[in-house]
Image: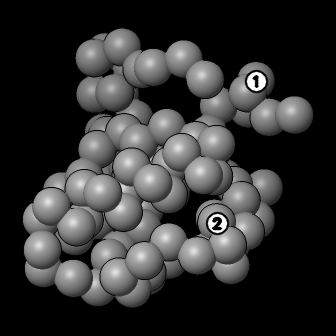
Amino acid sequence: MDALTSQERRALAARANRLKAQITLGGEVTDSNVAHVRRRFEQADLLKVRFSTDDRALCDRLASELAERAGCLLVQRVGRVATLFLSRGAES
């Protein structure tokens, strides 16, 4: 999957401002979490995920791992919330 340009990233982050986190994850990314994220992408191309940890490095790792395993792109991570994007053209 292609990386986002800074202009695309800004536009997606602006769209995500009005969204609330729809999924809350603990300290690890499980197959069940990945399946849940994929199901949510059937309804929307942009979603927010909240992590229940205050460890910034762990949040970064979890967000990256979740995006990779779910086959989507990490738009941004602010605090404990990551914004994920799945291009409709990228689905197979």
Q: Of helix, strand and loop, which one carries label 1?
A: helix
Query: Who's the residue at 50% across and 57% down the image?
Result: 66
Above or below, 79 relative to 90: below
Question: Mark 2 or 1, which is nearer the eye?
Answer: 2
Q: Which residue is mark 1?
A: 89
Query: Who's the residue at 64% across and 42% down the image?
Result: 71
Local packing at callout 2 (Cα closer than 10 Å; few below 14, some 14-19, many 20+) is some
Above or below, 73 relative to 24: above
For residue 19, say whether it is visible.
Answer: no
List x then y, in percent, for residue 6.
28, 17
Query: Who's the residue at 28% across and 44% down the image?
Result: 76
Q: Is residue 77 left or right of residue 54?
A: right
Q: Which residue is mark 2?
A: 34
Q: Of helix, strand and loop, which one carries label 2?
A: helix
- Which is more N-terminal, label 1 or label 2? 2
Q: CA distance from mark 2 to mark 1?
A: 20 Å
**Considering depth in this image, is 75 or 13 the residue closer to the camera?**
75
Q: Is residue 34 left or right of residue 17?
A: right
List x then y, in percent, for residue 59.
25, 65
Above or below, 35 relative to 85: below
List x then y, in percent, for residue 87.
65, 31
For residue 90, say whether it is visible.
Answer: yes
Local packing at callout 1 (Cα closer than 10 Å; few below 14, some 14-19, many 20+) is few
